[in-house]
Structure formats: structure tokens, C-alpha cells
Amino acid sequence: MLTSVVLLILSLFIILLGAELFTNGIEWFGKRLRLAEGAVGSVLAAVGTALPETMIPLVAFVQGRESHATGIGAIVGAPLMLSTLAFFVTGMAVFLFTLLKRRTTKMDVDPVVMGRDLKSFFIVYAVAIGAMFVPYKPVKVVIAFFLIGAYIYYVRQTFRCTSGRKREHELGPLHFRRDASVPRLRIIVTQVLAAMVCIVGGAKLFVTYIEPIARIIGVPELVLASIIAPIATELPEKFNSITWIRQRKDTLALGNITGAMVFQSSIPPALGLIFTAWAFSMEAFMAGAIAIVASIFAWAELTAKKRLSPYTLTAGIVFYAFYIMLYFLHI
């Protein structure tokens, strides 16, 4: 038990180290390629941290029909965690660093970037969830290619957007080459890859040792598989965003989450539509529906007030608690 706790704590430190290296490296990567802040946060950072967890459903689909339910569960679980718990953690980080006098509660979020991300998410994800009611496989395959095309269009629009270019932040030296004012691209890429190894390795270590601890203290297997493990797979986005919140780079912090939401609502569901019957359990359908409602809630404030507050972000815990309540009432 003690060994598992020590290794669990070690895994969190590894993820934190990876998050620091990743956020620093991906910013330099974007700077060298002269990319807008929105493209760095919503595409590069978001996809970079979402790819490892996307392998879970892909592996499940390859293993055979008996693993399809696991894969679909992983697909619908990721957007729920991002639109509720990740938002909550980010909002709480704003309050925490405000108390530490590292920043204020006012968030400098680009409404164009965030608005596009959130709207793209709930529209595309509604199509993906709605596809479960389509009885014909050929139609589901057509929807799958629509989802892929929608994500390609989103990436194209994000890279073409110049809004994020107006926000210039102080960029610290690259950790792998602190003596260089402008580090070489290959050193930047090396740091980003090393960071991803830390993030993925730390997350795997976390999942490995949270399981025996949960069983020892009597957490049911169903709760472990459906609630605790999915939270662990979203740790990279949460820690990356906390790092950027501390540095007052709010568009990057939230773009890291909302960009991952757009990716997770399109590419993994497209794979599910192609390789499975795309039939949902009630728990999976509830997860998808609540994720959509939570994202619309944040988008409504952004659209009405042209800003996003930490109060709205922390409301994500209410949506997640509602899901947990429905989950246990249903089972």
C-alpha cells in the first residue's frame, strides 16, 4: 500500500514535469513557425495531449467486438471530463493563483478562438451522438467522413485566424536550451517529445497504481472503471492548462481544453462509427448529452459578454455531479 501511494505521488510529479516542458516547448514551436496563439493552444497542444488517450478506443476496436463497448465508453467519457472537470480545475486554478497574487480573476480569453472551439464542439458532437439513432451502417460511415471533414475544416479555420496573433506574451527560455535566445527547431521538438513521454508515462503510472489503492480502500470496480480511470486519462490537459493559467496565458490554457474537445468529438467518434455498430448504453448517452449542455453553458456567456469568467468554468463541477447522480440512479 505504501509503495503504491509513493509511486502514485511520483506519477503526479512526472506529469507536472511533462506539463511544464510541454507548455514551454509547444509555445516555442508555435513562435518558430509564426503561428497564432489559437492554433498553438487549440490544435498543437490539444491534439498532442489528446492523442495518447485516443489510442485507448482504437486499441479496443482492434481487439474485437467484445471490446467495442469499452472503446465507445472511452470516446464519450473524454468530452464529458473536459467540458466539466477540466473546466472546473481551470477555474479553480484562476482563483488559487489570484489568492497567491500571481494574477487576477479577470481572464484574458480570445472570444473568437474560444467561441469557434465551443460552437464547433457542441455542433459536431451532437451529430456524433445523434448518429446512434441511425439504423443503417452505410449512413453511419457517411457521417463518420463528415466528422473527419468537419475537423479538417476546423483546423484550417484555426490556422487561418489572425485573432490570436494580437496577443503576445513574454516567453521564457526553452528549458532544454536556456542559454539560447532563439533555440533551434530540433531542440524544441526534442523537448516537446520528451515532455509527451513524461506525460504519457506519468499518466500510465497513475492509472496503474490508482487501481490497487482504490481496491484496498473499497472503491467498487464499476466506479473505478467508469469514473476514476477516465479522470486520470485527462490529467495532461488539466496540468497543461494550470501551467498556462499560472502564467496568465488564458487563451492557451482554455484552448488546450476546448481544442481537445473538438478533436475528441470528431476523430474518435468517426472511428467508432466506422468500426463498431455505434450503439450506446444509457450511461454513455447521458455523458454525451451533459457534455454538450455544459459546453453550451460556457459558450452562452462568451457570446453574450465576450468574456469567460472562472465562475462559469467552476460550474462545470455541477454538471459533472449531475452526471454522477444520474449514473448511480440508473445503475
Image (tube, grey):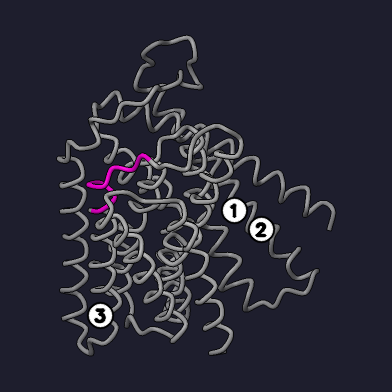
Disc 1 to disc 2, how far (Cα)? Answer: 6 Å
Q: Name the residue under label 2.
A: 208
Q: Residues in magenta? A: 108-115
Residue at mark 3: 131
In the picture shown, does residue 94 fall above or below 58?
Answer: above
Determine whether the residue tagged by mark 3 lies in a helix, strand or loop. helix
Give the mark, 1 or 3, whose residue is nearer the N terminus: 3
Closest to the camera, between mark 1 and mark 3, is: 3
- Residue with the mark numbered 1: 204
Residue 18 drawn at (x, y percent): 54, 37
Which percent across, then down, holds residue 117?
Answer: 27, 54
| 282 vs 95, nearest the viewer | 95
> Residue 219 at x, y = what percent?
72, 74
Give the residue type at disc 1. Lys
Looking at the image, which is closer to me, 103 or 247? 103
User: What kind of residue is marked 2?
Assistant: Thr
Amino acid type at circle 3 is Ala
